Image: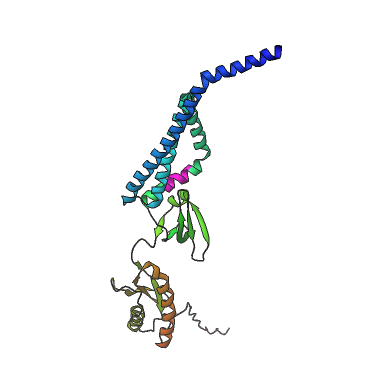
Amino acid sequence: MTRQVTFRSFWESVQLWFNQEAVGLLITAISILLILIVGKILITILRKVFGRMLARSKKINELMANFLLKIISVIGWVFVMLIVLGQMGVSLAPIIAGLGITGFILGFAFQETLGNLLAGVMIVLNAPFRIGDYVEIGSMNGTIRDMDMMSVTLATPDNKRVIMANKLIWGQAIVNYSYTERRRVEMRVSIAYDSDINKAKQVLRDIVSSYPEVLPDPAPVIEVTQLKDYSVDIIVRPWTAPSDYWKVHFRFHHDVLERFRAENIEIPFPQMDVNTSKVAEKSS
């Protein structure tokens, strides 16, 4: 008899709870679901609107646009989750205060990561290079293969894959050899003092003018640049497209060697003349 009374009391309590709380919980669940659906729709609309605006901007590249769209999504979902927590009756003041303290701790712990992120933002805003450019960064040089908000991937001339943190890149001098449409090739040739300088300059001019990669404007510069102890140095400065730089550089030195040999123009090598004199010994 006692068990029947206990079971009946429990069942009545369950029915009472459902009558009082079930409707409220159902309304809360439906409202949370609606908030999530509406939030997702609004975030999607915001991404599309800002995506079109960023695509029309000439100052913001694709990398920066994707980064900004991700920030919009994160901020949007943070607001949605705060609204959901408020709908569930959770006090937001302690959460916001806790987020501030947590943000400070995380910022201190991940200061290197944040430094790379901020450096990535500066690289994107200033655009010192693009994917496919050949650059020199400090002691490293290579072609930009990939870049994101944390690092840049280079392919060196011998096809090594180098990943550099954005913080290291932004703190060094960046030389972009692909930035302009033309690049000057600078080469030096040495001839002996006994050689005909005008003939040597004409041979060099003929070699350079025979290359289709050399641009006619500005005209190549071929002049005597230095008088050394054992040679006369001639500077040769033609202009080419950046992609043709090494092609001209390597071919030129090969052709100079062959033409100078054919024209009997001597290429000197370091040497030193030592003169001695014999002094007659005095007879004692």
Q: Is residue 46 above or below residue 15?
A: below
Q: Is residue 75 visible?
A: no
Identify the image quadrant of residue 283.
bottom right
Location of the C terminus by quadrant is bottom right
> Range of the magenta residues?
114-120
**Picture coordinates of residue 191, whole percent (x, y):** 40, 80
Q: How is the image coloured?
A: rainbow
Q: Is residue 229 above or below residue 265?
A: above
**Picture coordinates of residue 23, whole percent (x, y):** 49, 23
Residue at 42% x, 77% y is 251
- Residues 4 and 156: in front is 4
Kindly report the secondary structure that dominates the magenta region of the rendered protein. helix
Q: Is residue 40 above or below residue 119?
A: above
- Residues 84 and 100: in front is 84
**Picture coordinates of residue 96, whole percent (x, y):** 46, 28
Q: Is residue 109 magenta?
A: no
Residue at 39% x, 52% y is 62
Total number of numbered discs in the rendering: 0
- Residues 74 and 89: in front is 89
Q: Is residue 258 above or below residue 82?
A: below
Location of the N terminus by quadrant is top right
**Picture coordinates of residue 18, whole percent (x, y):** 54, 20
Q: Is residue 170 left or right of residue 222?
A: right
